[in-house]
């Protein structure tokens, strides 16, 4: 049932984005007097269709977008199927009509982005504390970052000359500047106490199979938490058996100070069968516990030992203005395109996401804390992305229709039908090939387990006394 609910939420939100974009084309075409043959959501053989006032409304079988069949715009039979009206019987339209109709789709997408941004402004967007700071909390032992001298509590000031404002996200963040760095060495300045320390970190990559996405530069350090506070301990868990209680604040692991709960997870991944010695503050007093990780009995299929600790959330709700959200989304899309076309970065086509990838991200967000707020914020970015990408002057896309209309306007006569057919078909095949290419990688990222069953440990009878 939980899976069905998430699926319905994802499909609904994704289709709203498509519907509004295509509605822009549809309403503009009606306004300008164009022949509208079909209004379709998704591609492929229709699984539902109905004709109303001469327009066929249908739902396709391939969840990869939508279209409005406008035979007077340009030949689109490769994607939309054979037209219903013979071309010689179609009344002529002006280049201005074509430009208006083509531009209406991206315009409506921007309008929907602004509408979602207004909703986000009212209900708020969850932001993790490390989005507003760039203090290091953990450095992977043996990594290139550690070899270069990066240490916990260092504050990242700049990377490759770009000032850093936050740890995660797009723009001037640690993760984005690391991923898009162009050299074999990432140059970083950090503040350590009262000093500014320059560091040269060699690029490090995770090993992947040839059929997976090309690896990006691995980020082997993590941001610091303001505090590592226990929110809850699961019944019968090693944490409960070991004596840990809600409200405890973890300050050390194996007698070494730690600054993020992720340090505990990394310790367990490197030494899965080793007891975890933790020092906590309880009512201001230090206590030491030794926890023995174990694999939960439910849900079935879990393989990694766990402690059974729920950490206190570091999320806060912010209310960014609609204009800031739109500006940030435009910057994110443009920055991604720039990184993609820049041959000196590791970003390439395999890192792009198609409809399957986008819906997978939505599903992950809906499962997370404050997921519906996260999904609303993502909808702003997706709509802006949809608008900008569709304005690329490539035939088949809205920008291509506008470019062809401008050429027709300058020439004072339509482009030859055969030339249009070749251009549209070639570009359509190119886009279809690209979509299949990114979908190949998107499918590998799918998370098939949408179970919301709680984690359960085997019953225990003894509880450890803290030292």
Image: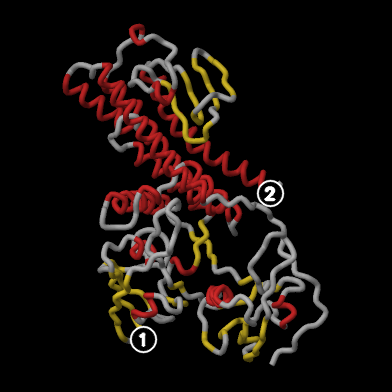
Question: Which residue is label 2 attached to?
Answer: 2
User: In the current view of this chain or complex, which residue is farthest to the top?
Assistant: 89
At horizontal 52% and vertical 37% (from top left) the residue drawn is 16
Badge 1 element? loop
Seen in the picture, residue 10 relative to 67 is either above or below; the reply is: below
Residue density around tag 1, few if under 14, some if 14–19, many if 20 or more, within 10 Å = few
Question: Which residue is label 1 attached to?
Answer: 193
Residue 114 shows up from this direction: no
Does residue 251 appear left or right of residue 99 in this picture? right
Q: Closer to the camera, 174 or 202?
A: 202
Where on the picture, by quarter, is residue 73?
A: top left
Q: Closer to the camera, 190 or 165?
A: 190
Seen in the picture, residue 392 relative to 223 is either above or below; the reply is: above
Seen in the picture, residue 282 relative to 203 is either above or below; the reply is: below
| Mark 1 or 2: the one toward you | 2
Badge 2 element? helix
Q: Closer to the camera, 45 or 38?
A: 45
Which percent across, then down, holds residue 22? 44, 30
């Amino acid at each position: 049932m939980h899976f069905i609910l998430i699926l319905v939420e994802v499909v609904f939100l994704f289709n709203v984005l498509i519907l509004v974009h295509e509605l822009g084309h549809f309403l503009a075409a009606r306004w300008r007097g164009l022949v509208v043959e079909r209004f379709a959501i998704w591609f492929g053989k229709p699984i539902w269709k109905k004709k109303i006032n001469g327009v066929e409304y249908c739902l396709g079988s391939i969840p990869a977008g939508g279209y409005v069949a406008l035979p007077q715009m340009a030949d689109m039979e490769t994607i939309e199927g054979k037209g219903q009206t013979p071309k010689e019987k179609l009344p002529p339209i002006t280049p201005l009509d074509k430009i208006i109709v083509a531009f209406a789709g991206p315009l409506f997408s921007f309008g929907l982005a602004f509408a979602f941004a207004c909703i986000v402004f009212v209900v708020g967007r969850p932001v993790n504390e490390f989005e507003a700071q760039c203090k290091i909390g953990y450095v992977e032992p043996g990594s290139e970052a550690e070899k270069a001298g990066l240490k916990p509590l260092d504050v990242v000031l700049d990377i490759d000359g770009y000032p850093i404002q936050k740890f995660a996200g797009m723009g001037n963040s640690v993760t984005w500047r690391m991923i898009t760095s162009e050299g074999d060495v990432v140059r970083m300045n950090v503040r350590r106490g009262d000093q500014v320390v320059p560091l040269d970190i060699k690029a490090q990559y995770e090993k992947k199979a040839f059929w997976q996405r090309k690896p990006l530069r691995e980020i082997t350090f993590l941001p610091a938490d303001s505090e590592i506070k226990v929110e809850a301990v699961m019944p019968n868990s090693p944490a409960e058996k070991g004596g840990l209680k809600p409200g405890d604040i973890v300050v050390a692991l194996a007698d070494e100070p730690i600054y993020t709960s992720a340090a505990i997870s990394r310790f367990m991944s490197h030494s899965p069968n080793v007891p975890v010695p933790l020092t906590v503050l309880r009512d201001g007093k230090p206590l030491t516990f030794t926890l023995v990780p174990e694999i939960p009995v439910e849900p079935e299929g879990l393989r990694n030992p766990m402690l059974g600790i729920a950490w206190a959330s570091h999320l806060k709700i912010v209310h960014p203005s609609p204009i800031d959200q739109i500006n940030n989304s435009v910057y994110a899309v443009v920055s991604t395109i720039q990184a993609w076309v820049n041959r000196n970065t590791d970003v390439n086509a395999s890192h792009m996401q198609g409809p399957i990838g986008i819906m997978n991200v939505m599903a992950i967000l809906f499962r997370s804390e404050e997921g519906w707020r996260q999904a609303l914020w993502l909808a702003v970015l997706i709509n802006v992305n949809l608008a900008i990408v569709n304005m690329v002057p490539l035939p088949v896309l809205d920008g291509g229709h506008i470019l062809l209309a401008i050429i027709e306007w300058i020439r004072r006569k339509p482009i030859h039908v055969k030339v249009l057919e070749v251009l549209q078909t070639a570009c359509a095949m190119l886009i279809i090939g690209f979509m299949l290419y990114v979908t190949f990688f998107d499918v590998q990222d799918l998370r098939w387990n949408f179970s919301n069953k709680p984690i359960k440990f085997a019953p225990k009878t003894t509880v450890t006394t803290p030292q």
